[in-house]
Amino acid sequence: MICRATRLFPLLMLQACGTAGWDIEGVLPATDEKLVGAASRYLDGGTIELYGTRNTHCNGTFTTRAAAGAKGKLLCDDRRSGAFTMNLISKKGEGTLNGSAFSFTLEKPRKQKR
């Protein structure tokens, strides 16, 4: 209820509702490239950042579709891009980068610095 009541005051909304964060571990099975990174969730979406073992760096955003689900897009510095989905209850996600499937897990939430 606090989040709803403070929607008119964006700065207060962020303090009242906070953020959730996860460490991410994943793999692109076609190339055996490992992915590590982090995701941060805000009220209606968030950001994701991944690093691959082949010196790849990917950034993306996602929106929450329901309390348990999210979908988003990634763009990598090696020009790969793709969409992904994740389930915030099972802490699992999957997607594609230029047609190659990948999967990942969300690890324990990180404490956010204030």
Image: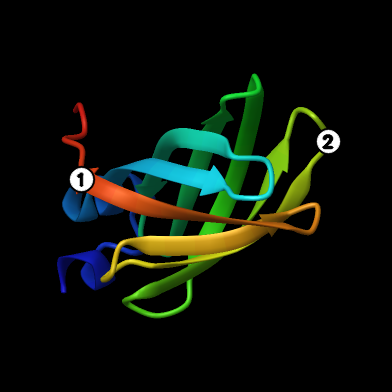
- Image coords of residue 63 (percent x, y): 51, 64
- Image coords of residue 17 (percent x, y): 22, 55
The image shows a total of numbered marks equal to: 2
Q: Is residue 85 above or below residue 104?
A: below
| Left or right side of 21 for 74 | right
Residue at the disc numbered 2:
79
Q: Nearer the viewer, residue 92 or 4?
A: 92
Residue located at (33% from left, 54% from top): 9
Q: Is residue 103 above or below residue 64?
A: above
| Left or right side of 58 for 70 | left
Sequence-wise, the earlier of marks 1 and 2 is 2
Mark 1 is surrounded, within 10 Å at the Cα level, by few (under 14), some (14 to 19) or many (20 or more) other residues, namely some
Q: Is residue 40 visible?
A: yes
Residue located at (33% from left, 76% from top): 68
- Image coords of residue 21 (percent x, y): 29, 44
Figure quadrant of the C terminus: top left
Which structural element holds mark 2? Answer: loop
